[in-house]
Amino acid sequence: MSTSVSAQLSKAVKQMYLELPQGDKVQAMYVWIDGTGEGLRCKTRTLDYEPKSIEDLPEWNFDGSSTYQSEGSNSDMYLIPVAMFRDPFRKDPNKLVLCEVLKYNNKTAETNLRNSCKKIMDMVTHEHPWFGMEQEYTLLATDGHPFGWPTNGFPGPQGPYYCGVGADKAYGRDIVEAHYRACLYAGVEIGGTNAEVMPAQWEFQIGPCEGIKMGDHLWIARFILHRVCEDFGVIVSFDPKPIPGNWNGAGCHTNFSTKPMRDAGGLKQIEEAIEKLGKRHQYHIRAYDPKGGLDNARRLTGSHETSNINDFSAGVANRGASIRIPRSVGQEKQGYFEDRRPSANCDPYAVTEALIRTCLLNETGEEPFEYKN
C-alpha cells in the first residue's frame, strides 16, 4: 500500500552508515511546533560535547517564513531548548531537543503555548498536579486512505478491532511496537498502547507526568511517531474525525488529579473540580482543539462514545459523558477524573493549562461557543 519514496530506500544500507563511529561529536535534533499549532519541524546541529542538561544546549534559529510563523522580510525565529531526550533513531550520545519558539523581538510566538502553561504550572507546584493523556491516532497510506482498508471500500463494522489481535483486526502493529520501544529508549513517560475501536486507529498513553512535563513528553512522543511512520512509509493523522460516518473519532482523553484528590477522601475535591468545569464548558471546548472547537465539533456528536459538544455532563464509568470518574475512584473515594473532551490534535499545553486555571485557580467567565451543522 505504501507509495512513499523515502520508505522504499534501503534501511539496511542506511544502518551501515549509522554504525560508523562519530568521534567526539554529538548530533542534536531540535524539534519545534510550527505556525499551524499542530505540525512539527526539526533540524540538526553538531555539538562538540554531549550535553548533560538543558543549560548545555545552545539557542538556535530558523526561517519562520517557511513554517507559517513570520514574514519573509523579517523571518528569523529563535529556538529555546526546554527539554532533552535520547535520540532513538541515531542512538546515544545523540539527542532530541524540544524547543520553545520566540519571535525576532524575543516575544513568544503565537503557537508557543508552553510559555504561558509553564507560568501557570509554576503557580500550583504545591498541589502536585498529575496528568495522563491518552493519544488516539489513525494510520493512513500516503494517498490519505486508512492503512489496511480496502482500496475502494470499507472493512467490516466496528466491534472486533478494539484491543484486537490477528491480521484481519490489527492494522499496523509493527509501527506501534517500533514507536513504543523508541519512546522507552528516548526516556518518554509512555504508559502503554492499545488498538482502538476503528480499524487502523491506535492509542498510546503518556503519564502520569507532573506539571509542564506532560506537554513536553506528549509532543516528543508525537514527533517520534511521525518519524517512525516516515520510515515505514505511512502517515499518522491526529484528525479528530478522520472518516465521516459510523466510525469512532480520535480524542486525547486527559486524566487529571492533584495531591488532595489522590489522598483519602479526595473524591470531594474531584466533585468540586467537576462543578467548576461545568460552569466553564465553552472555555474548555475552545481550548481543546487548535481551531477553537471547530475540529472537535466533528467528533463530539453525542454518539460514538462521546458527549455532545454543546452539553456538559459527568458520570461514573460513563464514556458518553464530558467527564468520567473511573469506577474504582468512585468506590475508593480518591484518585483522578478523566476529561474526555480534548481532541486528538489538541495542544497538551493548552489542555493542561485550562484545567489548572479552572480547577485550581478558580477562574470564571467564558465566551459562548455553539456549533450547528
Image: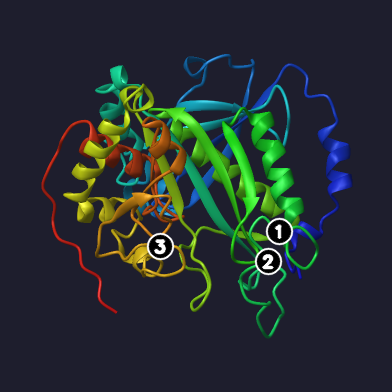
| Residue 90 picture quarter | top right
Give the Cα distance between marks 3 and 2.
20 Å
Identify residue for label 1. Answer: 164
Mark closest to the chain's N terminus, 3 or 2: 2
Lateral position of residue 293 relative to residue 169, left or right:
left
Q: Is there a contact, CB below 8 Å, between mark 3 and mark 1?
A: no
Quarter of the N terminus within the rendering? bottom right
Identify residue for label 3. Answer: 306
Q: Which mark is residue 45?
A: none
Residue 54 image point, x, y percent: 49, 19
Number of residues whose C-alpha sits closer than 10 Å to that of mark 2, classed few (under 14), some (14–19) or many (20 or more): some
Asked whether residue 150 is in view, the answer is yes
Q: How many marks do you count on the picture?
A: 3
Q: Which amino acid lies under the numbered mark 3 shown in the image of this protein?
A: Thr
The correct choice, above or below, for 59 with respect to 358 in the image is above
Residues 33 and 271: in front is 271
Give the Cα distance between marks 3 and 1.
21 Å
Identify residue for label 2. Answer: 160
The correct choice, above or below, for 211 with respect to 34 in the image is above
Residue 7 image point, x, y percent: 76, 58
Residues 250 and 169: in front is 169
Q: Residue furthest front?
A: 331
Residue drawn at x 56%, y 56% as measured from the top left: 137
Q: Secondary structure at mark 3?
A: loop
Residue 101 image point, x, y percent: 38, 37
Number of residues whose C-alpha sits closer than 10 Å to that of mark 3, classed few (under 14), some (14–19) or many (20 or more): many
Residue drawn at x 29%, y 36% as measured from the top left: 270
Q: Residue furthest bottom?
A: 152
Residue 3 image point, x, y percent: 74, 69
Q: Is there a contact, CB below 8 Å, between mark 2 and mark 1?
A: yes
The correct choice, above or below, for 355 with respect to 287 in the image is above
Mark closest to the chain's N terminus, 3 or 1: 1
